[in-house]
Each structure stands twice: as structure tokens, then as C-alpha cells.
Amino acid sequence: MTRSLAVLWCASAFCSAFLSFVVQPLLAKWLLPSFGGSPSTWAACLVFFQVMLLGGYAHAWLLSRLPLRWNRALHAALCLGVIVFSCTAELPPLHAAPHLPPGLRIVWLLACSAGLPYLLTACTAPLLSDWAAQLRAAVPHRLYAVSNLGSLLALAAYPAWVEPSWSLSEQYTLYCRAVLLAAVLSLTCLLQTLRTQTRPERAAAPVTWRARLGWSSCAFVPSLLLVAVSTHISVDLAPTPVLWIVPLAVYLLSFIAAFAGWVSRARGALAGAWVLFSALLAHSGFAAGTAQLWLQLTAALGSLACAGLLCHDTLVGARPAPAQLTSFYVWLSIGGALGGVSATFLAPWLFRDYYELELGSALCYALLWYAGRAREQSALRASAERRWLVLGALLVLPLMAAGCLLRAGYFGSREVRVLERRRSFLGALKVSEDRVARMLTHGRIRHGMQLIDPARSAQPTMYYGPGTALATVLSRHRATTPRRMGIVGLGVGTLAAFGKAGDQLSFFELDPAVVQLARQRFTYLARTPAAAQIEVGDGRLSLARAPGRALDILVLDAFASDAVPVHLLTAEAFAEYLRQLAPDGVLLANVSNRHLAVDRVVRAAAKLHGLACAVVDTGADATRFVSSVRWAVLTRDAAQLARLLEGHELRVATRPAVLWTDARASVWSIIK
């Protein structure tokens, strides 16, 4: 093969790998608003792309076993189909297939928007390797490195260049044009194989089922941990492409390092690091999310990196002869897809809380132990890796088990009784009760509380109790006339306690499970004299369908656990909120957060739209069952804002405001 042809083949591999990874955050960001910014949105996207990767590898494996005539004809048909698709493709309507559950609806939307081109880009590298083997060229040894380079550059390019430069529709259009180029390159490479009329002889060495299951297992565990770590980070910060890309990049780098042969000599040290990071992860889980942010991120990403390096190095050590490589990649991708499916679809069905990190860690210990025994039957006893694994199994796994039992309610105060647990695609919910109150916990954060004493059960509590900025504003703004209120985020329905006869309350809640629990386990909604209605769906999208200038008060309190719903805080979102508010309307946003200074984003949006904005902190008051809370209050008139908050001490801004837009919203910019 000439140098020019080698460059052509490498360009095809690079282009396909780049497109395979740049499209993932692109489409996930497109889906986010319709699914409420849920961390599970990215998990479902990962599953789809892992399954499509399996489809691409299976396509390459099948073609490598067909006669050359059929091999070329089928792949040419795929390339032509992608060319037609790229010339006619448009993003499908987000409301398509409403009868499907959220996870499956995401899969359907992704299949319609990128299924066929992703199949082509996924199969390119293994197929080019097979064709190069037919030509007896040296280029296959470069293809893997080139494709990995393309994948890494795509992960870096999306947040740094693609996301801030173009709108989502423009990004998708550019992706379709680039896919057209990838299909043309693949067809051009196919034409170079026409000179070959026979395949080289293949080795007939059989592959056992034990070997196949070993390959899949070594890919299953890191894939499970990838989804679990991504969800773990999103639950505490925000579901956003930047945060999704970091774990994916760590996972990819572990693959590259292992297949480059950089890991084997350092397995003992890596096993020690794995025990350290998994111990930190166990501590983070035991602390139920109260650990410092840097510790949670370090533990999660460090565990993913070490587990990925060790498992993928084990996978490299079990590679078959070159003639069986296409089969090897198929079984590898089967394990990866099963890991994603288990974390995204099986875990919410099997578990009532987030236990995937602990499960993945336990499986990693078991896999490394078993693989080590198979690799070094006699020498493993004296190896550093074995000693570290024994230490981790004896110390870390019991701590993880204790953390899981604590979160499940088996340990802790006997006065607190768990009444109900639910976990859905949108998160984990728990209703608990002590002698004084009943509480709803979403993820790791309490989202509502109602006093059990019938004489006080109508009293607002926690973030809405007496003395908070919200309670003050609702007691002063249009208090003597009927009001129209919109509330994004239902919780337990506490804000219904402020409703009077003649008031109209419109709640917008994404999770149907929250609606059921608010109605079945709490009485705020049933007891309010106001006319209260609940619309299930994302608040921003629901408001966009409503007529404008209809609300006297709009309240934003739609946090899932401690994650920030980015799409509800952008400049475009606030423009929609202003369209909904009456001329003297008031907008209130709960900007409380353990890790992020959300008020900086709200202040920037207020300045952009010419609004008066004040931020009010309220300290915890156990006697009145009020939690520490920070509310941002926005009005069109500064004098009106001053009257509403008279008597409150306003927070003085010490750090600059940060404007978020639909095109660019950096969570890192507001970390405390």
C-alpha cells in the first residue's frame, strides 16, 4: 500500500472515530430538556451508543466471514444508505413515541436521528483492519492508534469548540455533512480492495466459551462503572455534556493505555491505587453525599480509571490470535453493552436507590481475583496485586455494604421509619417518617416535609417556612386578590399551603412518581382551598406551550437531589419566564446548593433582561421547622422588589455573575 493510500485509510478511521464520539454529547444535550435534565438521560444515551457499537463490530465480523463479493456489496449499500440519510436527515420531533417509557423513547429518538450513520462509523475501524489484512498492508497497526486519537479529540472538541460555536440544529447539520464525508471515504477505501479476489488463510484455532465470557466480563465491569460514575457525578452537580465527557474520557484513556501495553508492569501499584480510591468511594457512599465535592469526584473518577486500566489490561492479556480479532471485538462490545443496560435499565428495576457503584466495585474485585488466579496459578500468592486485593476485599467491601444498608434504612435512628421507596428513570425517592414529620427525599436531598400533628399539618416547612424570602413575598404580593401562580417542581406540594380561595395554582412536575407520592403520602394538595392542577412534564417546555402574561408569581424549585437543571437557568429560559409573568409579576428561584453558587447565574440572567434581583439567605430554625435556604427574587420594578423584601437582609454579591445560555453553560464556572 502506498503512503497516499495509507493516509486515506487513516483519515477514514480518524473521521469515523471522531464522529462516533462527538455525536454523543450533541444528541444527549438535545434530549435533556424533554427529560427534565435527568442524569438518566445520559445513561440511556450511553446504552444506545454501546449497543450501536456492538452492531458495528457485529457488522464487521459478519462481513469478514462472507465471500468478498457479498462483503463489498453489503458495505457499499450501507455507505449509500448513509449518504442518502445525510442529505435528508432532520432531528425528529421530541414528542415522538409518547407511549414508550422514557428510556426506550430516548433510544427511539437516537435511532431515528443517528442510528444508521453511527453503525457505519462504529464498524469502520475493524472493517478497515480486515481489508488491510487482505492487502497484506502494515496500515492496520496504525488504525487503532489513529481511531483512538480521533475519539479523544472529539471529546475535547465538543465542549471547547463545537458547543459554543453553533446551535444544536447547526451542530446536527454539520454532523450530517461530516457523516457524508465519512461514507465517501469508506467507499473509497472499499474500492482499493477490488484488486484482491481471495482472502488470506485464517488460523483455525477454536475459541472456547470460557474465553468469550472472560472477554465480555472484562468489558462489562468498566462499562457498568462508567454509567454509575456518570450518574453519581450528575446527581450532585448537573447533567451536562461537560460532566459526562470527563468519565467517558477517563474510560477511553484506560482502554488506550491498556491496549498500548503501558499497564502490565504497573499492575501491583494500580491495584494499590484501586483499593485506595474504592475506599474513598466507600466513604463517600457511607456519608450519603455529605462528603466534600473534591473527595466525591476524586473517588469516583479515580476508581473508574483504576478499574478500567486493570480490567482492560486483563482483557489485553486474553487477546486471541489475529484471525479471531473480529470475534474478540464483538464479545468485548457485548460486555460493554450489557454493562450499560444493567446500570441504566435493570438497576432502577432491581434497586430502590443508587447501588451501582458498590455493585461494580464488588464485581471488579471478584473479576481481578479470578483473572489473577487463572493467569498466575502459583505466583499470584506472593504478588503485590493479590495482597492489595485481599486488603480491599476485607476492608473496603464491608464498608460499602454498611453504606448501602445505612441508605436503605437498616441502620441509623430507630425513630425514623421508611414508609416507601421508589426508583424510576428520573431518580430515587424515599418517604420517611419520625414522631414529628413525614419527609420526601429525592436522591440525597430532602425535598419536602409535612408535620404530623393535624393542628400544624398545613404549616409550610423547610425551604418555604416562616421567615423565608418566599413566604414573605407570597404574604405581600397581591395577597388580597386572587392570584395565578406557576410552580416548577412539585416536591410534596408545600406551596399549596399558600393558596387561598380563588387562587389558581399550576404545578409543573417531571416525575409521575413524585406526583403520586405527593397525593398519596402528603395532604397539602388535598387541603388547599385554591384550584390546584398538576401538569406532568418539563417545566420549561410546559410553560412554552402556555399563553403569555398569565402568572402573577412563578416559582422555580425543580432540583433533583442536588443537581442543577441547567436548561431551566439559561438566558433563553428566563426570556420564557418573563413572557409568562404579568407586568407586576414576581419570579422566585430556589438557588440553594451545597456545591454550586447558582445565584450567580440567576443574577446574570436578571441583568441581561433588565430585571431587579435580590438574593436572600435564611438560616435554619428548628423550632419552626425551617431549613437553611437561599432564594433569588426578581421583578421588573426595583421599587416593587424593595417593598416585597422590606425587613430582609439582602445578600451582597462578592463574585461576578455568570451568564448561561442554551449553547454554553459551564458548571465549573460556579463551583464554590
Image (cartoon, helix red, strand yellow):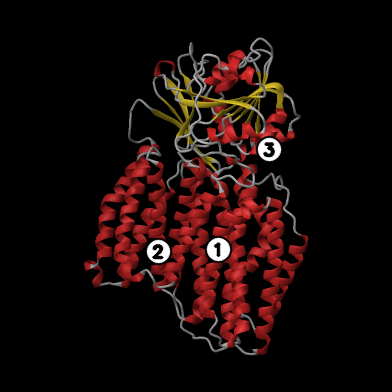
Vertical placement of residue 159 versus 419, above or below: below
Dot 3 alpha-carbon crowd within 10 angstroms: few under 14, some 14 to 19, many 20 or more: some
Q: Which residue is found at the position 69% from the left and 44% from the top?
A: 98
**Dot in front, 1 or 2:** 1
Dot 2 alpha-carbon crowd within 10 angstroms: few under 14, some 14 to 19, many 20 or more: many
Amino acid residing under circle 2? Leu
**Dot in front, 1 or 3:** 1
Q: Which residue is found at the position 60% from the left and 66% from the top?
A: 55
Q: Residue furthest left?
A: 382
Vertical placement of residue 664 versus 535, above or below: below
Give the labeled residue for mark 2. Answer: 309
Q: Nearer the N terminus, badge 1 or badge 3?
A: 1
Give the labeled residue for mark 1. Answer: 153
Secondary structure under tag 2 reads: helix
Q: Which residue is found at the position 55% from the left and 81% from the top?
A: 139
Residue 95 in picture, x, y percent from top left: 71, 45
Quarter of the image that includes the N terminus: bottom right
Vertical placement of residue 7 versus 354, above or below: below
Q: Is 132 situated left or right of 550 in this image?
A: left
Give the labeled residue for mark 3. Answer: 541
Amino acid residing under circle 3? Leu
Q: Nearer the viewer, residue 639 or 37?
A: 639
Q: Is 395 situated left or right of 298 in this image?
A: left
Alpha carbon separation for disc pair 1 and 2: 20 Å
Residue 609 in picture, x, y percent from top left: 67, 32
Q: Nearer the N terminus, badge 3 or badge 2?
A: 2
Secondary structure under tag 1 reads: helix
Q: Nearer the N terminus, badge 1 or badge 2?
A: 1
Tell me if I can see residue 39 in this picture: yes
